[in-house]
């Protein structure tokens, strides 16, 4: 199973090579998409994810994680490729549908595949490395994006498509893992999975709270951050370097397990989410280029660092139908994320500062939820 881990690390690296990411929203704006339309498409993406999470999870538990990942990575590839041909809202809608199906298919399945490919006492370390390889790739692609974007953003998209194509080849080489199969009928399997979740009230709240925190962090570091930097006068060609700097922190996710062992998962998670909330507060008031870079990069890095802890807690709450339950967890988070995107997008179209205020309030609720959960877990 060590081969599986190595190949999944390579895939994580390839999936992180998104050379156009530092200007993804700006690219869409140049092709006729407004900010509110962009966030509406994010809402559509998450809605599709919600509707397809459980069917994908059942498919994975029934037919195998490897087959599911092959199909999902193929959809991801087609989603990236279609970006080259989008020039209208309808075009971007089609691209969103392909991407959403790839996201929901991969969601939970890649983590379940990793979890079954490693020793259970090393899961947090494996998740950390998986995240770190993705961050390393994003770091490299962010730095090199300057050269691609200087020629054309389309060239950056083409380079991304090639990386995603190679990841399909890599997943085909992996060996499938054993799955805890249920003898029940499909409806009973899904019902059984829901029953497991509803019996764990605090896990349910934990899933929602961490999804809120992650969505706000990604929304700022990936999307609102671009608008903020553009507003305070940073040349868009240099956004790649800023993204690269943010990934330096994110690469520390491979060492999150070390910090957890020293001061405990509880304290590590609480400290990091408090720093993230403070970062959002600072963005409401600052127009400083230096402070903005530090704050947004910190947000991007820390959300990657808490990911191994969150994934470890989620996986420890599951005894069977792992891909299905992880898909349900993701679905629950996606429901809340969808409405968060709508609210933030609406505010951003009016005034960017209103969007940051909204983000602060929503993330504050997420932090409060995590505190409640950790208290009751212990």
Image: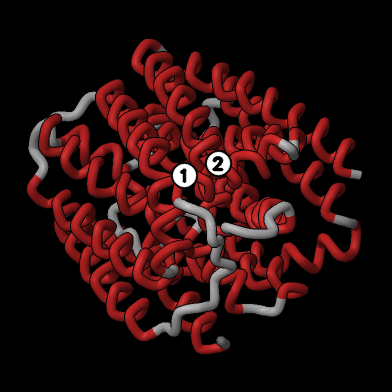
Tell me the number on the disc at residue 191. Answer: 2
Q: Position of residue 129 (x, y in %)?
A: 60, 71
Color encoding of the figure? secondary structure
Q: Residue furthest front?
A: 184
Other-residue count near label 1 (Cα within 10 Å), few / some / many at <14 / 14–19 / ≥20 = few
Element at badge 2? helix
Q: Is residue 146 left or right of residue 255?
A: left
Other-residue count near label 2 (Cα within 10 Å), few / some / many at <14 / 14–19 / ≥20 = few
Quadrant in the picture for residue 30:
top left
Q: Position of residue 108 (x, y in %)?
A: 51, 56
| CB contact under 8 Å: marks 1 and 2 | yes
Find the distance from the CA under tag 1 to the CA under tag 2: 6 Å
Q: Position of residue 272 (x, y in %)?
A: 74, 45
Q: Is residue 154 left or right of residue 110?
A: left
Q: Is residue 274 visible?
A: no
Residue 97, compared with residue 170, is above or below; it is above
Residue 192, compared with residue 360, is above or below; it is below
Q: Where is the C terminus found, in terms of image quarters?
A: top right
Q: Position of residue 163 (x, y in %)?
A: 28, 70
Q: Nearer the viewer, residue 354 or 375?
A: 375
User: What residue is at 54 percent from the left and 33 percent from the top?
Assistant: 216
Element at badge 1? helix
Q: Nearer the viewer, residue 87 or 41?
A: 41
Q: Is residue 318 left or right of residue 140?
A: right
Q: Is residue 215 visible?
A: yes
User: What residue is at 35 percent from the left and 70 percent from the top?
Assistant: 67
**Which residue is labeled 1 in the image?**
187
User: What residue is at 32 percent from the left and 69 percent from the top?
Assistant: 70
Tell me the number on the disc at residue 273. Answer: none
Q: How many marks?
A: 2
Residue 227, compared with residue 269, is above or below; it is above
User: What residue is at 46 percent from the left and 44 percent from the top?
Assistant: 187
């Amino acid at each position: 199973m060590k081969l599986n881990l190595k190949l999944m690390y390579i895939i994580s690296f390839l999936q992180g090579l998104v050379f156009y990411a530092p200007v993804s929203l700006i690219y869409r704006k140049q092709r006729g998409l407004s900010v509110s339309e962009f966030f509406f498409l994010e809402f559509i993406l998450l809605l599709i994810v919600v509707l397809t999470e459980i069917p994908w999870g059942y498919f994975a538990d029934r037919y195998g994680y490897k087959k599911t990942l092959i199909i999902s990575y193929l959809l991801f590839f087609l989603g990236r490729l279609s970006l080259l041909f989008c020039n209208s809202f309808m075009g971007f809608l089609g691209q969103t549908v392909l991407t959403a199906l790839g996201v929901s298919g991969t969601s939970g399945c890649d983590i379940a595949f990793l979890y079954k490919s490693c020793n259970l006492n090393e899961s947090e370390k494996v998740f950390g490395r998986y995240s770190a390889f993705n961050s390393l790739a994003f770091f490299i692609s962010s730095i090199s994006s300057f050269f691609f974007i200087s020629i054309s953003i389309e060239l950056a998209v083409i380079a991304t498509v090639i990386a995603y194509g190679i990841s399909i080849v890599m997943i085909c080489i992996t060996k499938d893992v054993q799955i805890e199969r249920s003898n029940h009928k499909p409806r009973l399997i899904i019902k059984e999975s829901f029953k497991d979740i509803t019996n764990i009230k605090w896990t349910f709240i934990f899933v929602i709270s961490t999804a809120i925190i992650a969505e706000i962090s990604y929304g700022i570091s990936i999307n609102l951050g671009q608008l903020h930097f553009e507003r305070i006068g940073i040349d868009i060609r240099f956004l790649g370097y800023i993204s690269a700097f943010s990934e330096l922190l994110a690469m520390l996710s491979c060492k999150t397990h070390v910090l957890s062992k020293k001061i405990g998962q509880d304290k590590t998670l609480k400290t990091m989410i408090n720093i993230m909330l403070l970062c959002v507060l600072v963005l409401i008031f600052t127009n400083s280029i230096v402070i903005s870079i530090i704050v947004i990069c910190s947000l991007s890095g820390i959300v990657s660092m808490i990911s191994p802890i969150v994934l470890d807690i989620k996986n420890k709450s599951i005894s069977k139908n792992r891909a299905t339950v992880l898909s349900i967890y993701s679905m629950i988070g996606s429901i809340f994320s969808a409405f968060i995107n709508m609210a933030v997008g609406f505010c951003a179209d009016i005034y960017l500062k209103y969007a940051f205020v909204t983000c602060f309030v929503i993330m504050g609720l997420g932090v409060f939820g995590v505190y409640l959960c950790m208290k009751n877990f212990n």
